[in-house]
Image (cartoon, helix red, strand yellow):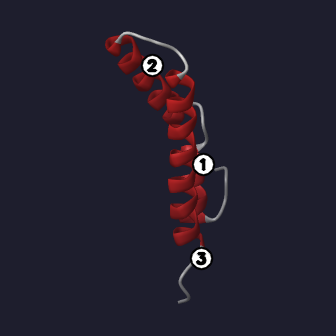
Amino acid sequence: MNPSWRKPFGMLLILALISAWAVLVVTITGRYAMHPLAEGLVYIVAGLAWLWLFPMRRLLRWIELGRWRD
């Protein structure tokens, strides 16, 4: 059985996407002076948007099964 190249590539892709998303959110929130609680709320909403709006589930499915959809 040959090891799949999708797992290491997918892991690096996930790390790159999370890093890019974090830099984007910090850059956007850094431009505005907000109360610390409001800023925390923005980070929570942005984190949930990352999990729900972006195709993390499909990416993980592709890593495991080699296909994007059911």
Q: Is residue 57 visible?
A: no
Q: Which residue is mark 2?
A: 42
Which label lies toward us, 2 or 1? 2
Vertical arrangement, residue 58 with respect to residue 2, above or below: above
Tell me where residue 43 appears, x and y as whole percent.
Answer: 42, 25
Q: Which residue is mark 1?
A: 58
Task: Please give the count of numbered marks on the rendered protein.
Answer: 3
Quarter assignment of residue 27: top right
Where does residue 57 sit, x and y in percent of width and height? 54, 45
Q: Amino acid at mark 1?
A: Arg
Element at label 1: helix
* Amino acid type assigned to the residue bearing label 2 in the image: Val
- The percent position of residue 7, horizontal first and vertical second, equals 53, 69
User: What residue type is disc 3 on?
Assistant: Trp
Tell me if residue 31 comes above or below residue 62 in the rendering: above
Q: Residues within 10 Å of mark 2 (few under 14, many from 20)?
A: some
Is 27 above or below relative to 63?
above
Residue 54 rendering spot, x and y as whole percentages: 60, 37
- Disc on the earlier residue, 3 or 2: 3
Marks 1/3: CA–CA distance: 17 Å
- Tags 2 and 1 touching, CB below 8 Å: no
- The reply to whether dot 1 and dot 3 touch (C-beta < 8 Å) is no
The residue located at (50%, 24%) in the rendering is 30
Marks 3, 2: nearer the viewer: 2
Label 1 neighbour load within 10 Å: few <14, some 14-19, many 20+: some
Q: Residue at x 54, y 63 (%)?
A: 12
What is the crowding at mark 3: few (fewer than 14 residues within 10 Å), some, or many (at least 20)?
few
Residue, disc 3: 5
Front one among 7 and 18: 18
Q: How much space separates mark 3 and mark 2, taking CA atoms? A: 36 Å
Please report whichever mark, 2 or 1, sits nearer to the chain's N-terminal start. 2
